[in-house]
Amino acid sequence: MQFGISFGALYAPTERIVKLAKEAERYGFDYIWLPDSQLIYRDPYMNLALIAEVTTHSKLGTLVTSPLTRHPSVIACAAVTLDEISNGRAVIGLGAGDSSVRRIGLSPSTSKQLSEAIDIIRKLCRGEIVDFRGARFGLRFGGRRIPIYVVATGLKMLRLGGSLGDGVVIHSGTNSTLLDLALKAVKEGAEAAGRKIESADLVHMGFCALSEDRLEAYREVKPSIMWFLVRYLPLLKETGMSLSGELIGRVERFEEYSEEHDLHHSGEWEKAMEMASFLPDRFANDLAYAGTPEDITKKIREIESRGFKQVIIRPTSTEYWESTFRTFAEHVIPNFR
C-alpha cells in the first residue's frame, strides 16, 4: 500500500508547505498532493516546483486541478514543466472542481468538459497535435507520459475515471456499501471503454482525524463530513444511508450557512465542529478515516483487500493538520511497511 498526503486545509505560506512536504517524504508518504483553489491556497504548481527541489522520490501532483479555471493547455504546460524539474515525478489530479469554481460564480465541470480536457492534456503532454474547436495546436516541448488521475465522488465521474483515467481517486467514504458502489461505477466505465478495472490505479481518499478518544476524532471530522453530505445525498440514498427528514432539514440549513461561511475551509474549526455536532457518529465512521490509529489501520486493510493501491489522507483543518499528519505517519504507515 502506498500513501499520499493532501495539503488541503493547510492555509500556510509556501515556506511552511515546502518544509512539511520534505518531512512527509521522510515519514514515508509516497505522494504529495496540493490543492488547486486560487482564492484559498497558494499556487500549487509554484509550490510543487519548490517541493521537487527538496524531495527525491515522492510523486508530486494537484488534488484537484479544474479545466475551467486552467485551460487544458495551461495544465499540460505546467505538468510537463514540473515533470522536467522533478525528474519524472509529476502526476495530474483532475476533477470537476469545487471551491475553485464555486467561489468565482462557476459550476463544476460536466463529464463532457472533463473528458475533453483529459484528451487534450494527455495528447499535449505526449507531444501530439490537438484539433479542438477549430484550432490546431501542440506543446513545443511535449513528449512525456504524465499520469492523469480523475478525482471523483459521484457515479458519473467515477465511470469517467474508469473509462479514461490512468488512475481514479475515489472520494466516497469508507463504508463497505459505498466502496462497492464506487468500484462498480469505475468498473462499468472501464468495461464501456474496453478496459479492465485493473488498467487504472485505484486510489482512495478520505478525510482523516485521529485520536485515542474515538468520539473526539468523530467530532473533529464532522464539518468535513457535512461537506460530503451536502453534495452527495443522492449517492447516500442509493446505499440505504439516507438521513431522516429532520436531519436532511438540518443539513440543508447547514448548506445555506456554509454557502456564506464555508465551514469546510474554515479557519475557526472549533466553531465548525459546534455547527456540525448534530450529525450522528455513524456518518463520521462511514465517511472518513476517523478514530484511533488502530481503527484506521483496520479500515485501510479493508481498502487494500479491494484492490486499492494508494490511500490519500486529507486532514480536517489548519489547527489539526500537522498533528494528524504526524500521528498517521508514526502510528499507521509503519503497519504497512
Image (cartoon, rainbow, N blue to C red):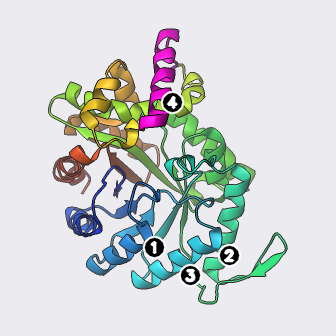
Horizontal side of 88 relative to 213 (left or right) equals right
Indicate which disc residue 90 carries.
1
SS category of the residue bearing label 1:
strand
SS category of the residue bearing label 2:
helix
Q: Tell which of 194 and 86 is nearer to you.
A: 86
Mark toward the start of the polypeptide (2 vs 4): 2
Amino acid carrying mark 1 in the image: Ala
Residue visible at 60% across and 24% down in the picture: 238
Residue carrying label 4 = 230
Distance (Cα) linking label 2 and label 4: 36 Å
Mark toward the start of the polypeptide (2 vs 3): 2
SS category of the residue bearing label 3:
loop
Residue 211, x across and y down, in percent:
18, 35
Residue carrying label 2 = 123
Distance (Cα) linking label 2 and label 3: 10 Å
Figure check: 151 above or below 303: below
Residue 84, x across and y down, in percent:
45, 85
